[in-house]
Amino acid sequence: MMREKVLVLLLIISLCGNVILVFFNPFLSQSLPGTNNTSGFAGIDLSKNTGHNEFMLDEYGNLIGIPPTEKTTDVPNLTVPRGDSDLSSSDPETGELNETAVMIPGEPTMTPTPEVTEEIPLDPLVTYENKKFGFSLRYPRNWTINEAAAGRTVLTLTAPIERGCDSDTSQCYNYIANLTVEIDQKPKTLILEDYFNSAVSQLQLDYFITTTSKSAPALLSDTRAYQIEYYTRDKRGNADRRYMQYYALMDGKVYIVSYFGPYSTWENVYDHNKPDAQMVVNSFTVQRTFKTA
């Protein structure tokens, strides 16, 4: 019996609520979800009293405030494939690793500095090797070389040509200094001193030489040698050419290295190139042959 009374009471309350809802419908229509009007109920600003901007009715006709929805700002997706970023953060709710791209300033481009190569100075000397006759030497790069054989002469080197004119005769000349290598492969004697004395005597008969320097012993290719300096005369008896010669006997052959140029008291082609000629003589090397004893 008591239960039936309670149900009747609830029914009456529900009916009263519906009547109130119908009566105040014009005012509440502006406060239902989907509207932005928060003017309130019966001239009362409900948003100030409840802190809510939107309302709805429950099943019993009661007004219920709807919590305001937080506005979110679209954030551009900065996620990058795994492994493309060095920094990452984990999502505590999903347990997954969210990798976010981090803007890293680009490294400055390094422009390679061109290497400064030091210019290697050119060797002023040239190495010459004669395989046929087994000797080598070094000569100045500005000298010319001629391997044409003429009799005993197997090599001729020529220093730079100097030119000059005689003011008295108005005649111009080329002044040339040469260095030659001669090989006597069948000498009449294998005694160097006898060979040298015989050669000097023959020069005296042919060219009327005047000896200016004679020394013994000297060295040629680290071998004992004879050296002589002299000048020749022309048919009228005037000084003609100047010579410096070395004689050496090696492996049954006589090697004769001669430097010569025009004789003159006013031009210096011979003296000017003599230091270079002496250097060539000092570099002269014979490839020795050895026989079994």
Image (cartoon, rainbow, N blue to C red):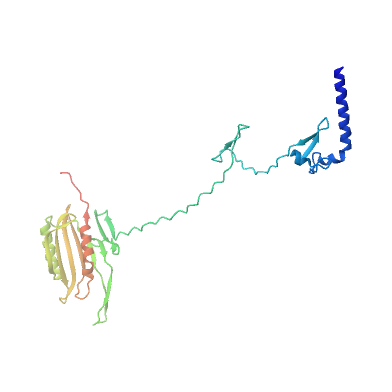
Residue 152 visible in rendering: no
Q: Quadrant of the N terminus?
A: top right
What x and y, as percent, mark residue 190? 13, 55
Q: In the displayed structure, would residue 165 be above or below residue 78?
A: below
Instruction: Kindly identify the residue that appears in the image at 17 percent across and 63 percent down.
Output: 245
Q: Is residue 71 left or right of residue 171?
A: right
Residue 203 occupies quadrant = bottom left
Which residue: 87% across, 19% down? Answer: 4
Q: Is residue 10 above or below residue 99?
A: above
Q: Position of residue 160 (x, y in %)?
A: 28, 68
Instruction: Compare residues 17 and 92 and report the one nearer the observer.
Output: 17
Q: Quadrant of residue 246?
A: bottom left
**In screen coordinates, is 214 left or right of 267?**
left
| 61 or 260: nearer the viewer | 61
Could you say which is closer to the camera, residue 223 or residue 90?
Answer: 90
> x, y (%) of residue 224?
14, 55
Determine the residue positioned at 26% across, 63% down.
157
Q: Quadrant of residue 274?
A: bottom left
- State the image coordinates of residue 77 (x, y, percent, origin top left): 64, 42
